[in-house]
Amino acid sequence: ALENRPELRNAELAIASAEIGLKEARNAMLPQVDLQGSVSRGGRDHKPREVFYGIRDRNDHTWSVGLSGSLPIRNRAARGSYQVAEIGVEEAELRRAQTTADIELQVMLAARSVDTNQFLVEANRQTRLVQETNLQAEERRLTLGLTTNFQILEVEEDLTTAEVAELNAMIELEKALVDLAYAEGAILERLGIEVTQPEPRKPVNYFRSVTPFVNPRPEK
């Protein structure tokens, strides 16, 4: 029942999202080192034409490499964000535990309701059979002159009441079965409805992200 309920899946996604935020906050507390580099080529001359030739012939070729880093001393903002992220993970886990407990309680109550209504259906069925037997007996007594039509009408009324009670019990049993299927997360399966999940989209590669106006190559 737990694996079929969307509420629990949402709780799991909330925990995963909170853990990603915790990792991001943890990374913000770490020292940072950046490696930078550049390469260029050009040309120099008094004449513009010769400048372009210099670019072609790589007359002025330069490159540079740099390394920079930062070390947070107190970094209160990052530490505060990390503590907030930790609390977010704990709250998400508590919500998942509460959701699990709620689902288990719903399943238990729904199953108990099914058992109760099954008992009521059987009890009302027996009552209806007894009233049918009473009506048959009264009809025999009427043929023998031992009862009256008024008594027959009263017994028929009792039989109708028993039939209505049995029908109501059967309706309540069907409702209880639907509630149990909903609590177990299997209502679509029991109705024969299949839901196909769409395939996840592939992430955009780096070349496609920097060249948005280039038609992508067809996938083989």
Image (cartoon, rainbow, N blue to C red):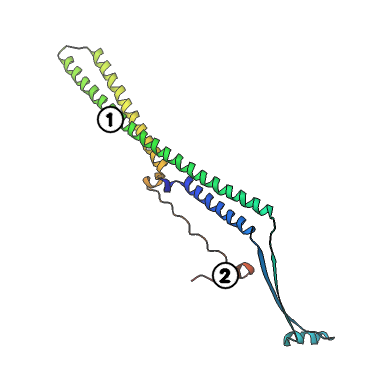
Q: Is residue 83 left or right of residue 115?
A: right
Q: Position of residue 93 (x, y in %)?
A: 51, 47
Which of pointers 1 and 2 indicates the residue nearer the eye? 1
Picture quarter containing residue 139? top left
User: What's the amino acid at mark 2?
Assistant: Pro
Q: Secondary structure at mark 1?
A: helix
Q: Is residue 24 above or below residue 54?
A: above
Task: Indicate which disc residue 9 carries.
Answer: none
> Mark 2 sits on what residue?
216
Residue depicted at x 68% and y 62%: 71
Q: Position of residue 117 (x, y in %)?
A: 34, 31
> Mark 1 sits on what residue?
122
Picture quarter containing residue 107? top left
Q: Nearer the viewer, residue 1 or 160?
A: 1
Q: Nearer the viewer, residue 69 or 37?
A: 69
Residue depicted at x 19% and y 21%: 136
- Quadrant location of the N terminus in the rendered image: top left
Q: Is residue 96 above or below residue 207?
A: above
